[in-house]
Amino acid sequence: MILRSENTWEEILGIFLVLSGVLLRISPHPSNFTPVMAIALFSGVVLSPSIALVIPLIVMIVSDLVIGPHALYPLTWGSFFLVSLLGVAIRKNTKISRIFFGTLGGSFLFYLVTNLGVFLYQDMYEKSLSGLFRCYLMALPFFRNSLLGDLFFSSLFFGVFFIVKNYSQKLISQKIR
């Protein structure tokens, strides 16, 4: 299955879907139910790698300027950059199962990295193994929402792109006949 942009219009559609993610992140939403991880994966798979690696960072920078500062910028932005790289790797042999497992992997990566950052850089938990365990345990409700959001938005972005791409190819082939 070819699920990447192959012409300018498909690249524009991909960028439009990504930019809509910025609006979805800054609009009211359930806690941690955002499209950013899905944007990172989608960008890596669909857009050209040079654009794909920059777009999620732009999404985060723009939306963080609106939402407000936090101490974990490098970890959140770095996590999404790594998910974009994962998307670029998936791009070479795109399958629905790879997108699904890429989404799960991105969700777990973000959960593990950012909560380790909370443990290390904030004074919310005792600096011990039990404090680290408690940090990850207390973050599970946020992880649930993140995972649900990641699965929902990945399905939405990849689904819309797939439908539009296939529909436009059918229209083109009908016009050629």
Image (cartoon, rainbow, N blue to C red):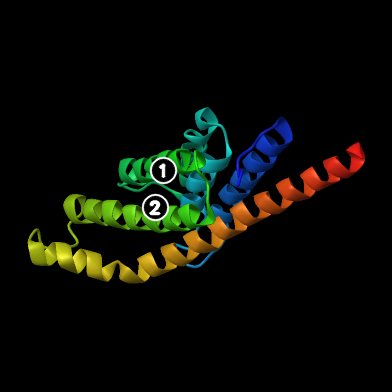
Image coordinates of residue 23 in percent, x first then y, are: 60, 51
Residue found at the very far top of the displayed protein: 50
Residue position marked by numbered label 2 in the rendering: 106
Q: Which residue: 32% across, 58% down? A: 111
| Badge count | 2
Q: Secondary structure at mark 2?
A: helix
Determine which residue is flagged by label 1.
86
Which mark is nearer the camera, 2 or 1? 1
Residue 31 visible within the image: no
Residue at horizontal 61 percent and vertical 43 percent from the top: 2
Residue 74 vs residue 65: left or right? left
User: Closest to the observer: 123 or 143?
Assistant: 143
Compare marks 2 and 1 and give the one earlier in the sequence.
1
Disc 1 marks a residue whose amino acid type is Leu
166 vs 31, left or right, is: right
The image shows residue 105 at horizontal and vertical percentages of 37, 55
Q: Amino acid at mark 2?
A: Gly
Name the residue at the front extreme: 177
Whether 125 is drawn above or below 20: the answer is below
Q: Quadrant of the C terminus?
A: top right
The location of residue 131, given as percent across then percent down, is 13, 64
Residue at 69 percent of width and 38 percent of height: 10
Q: Is residue 91 left or right of residue 126?
A: right
Cβ–Cβ under 8 Å for marks 2 and 1: yes
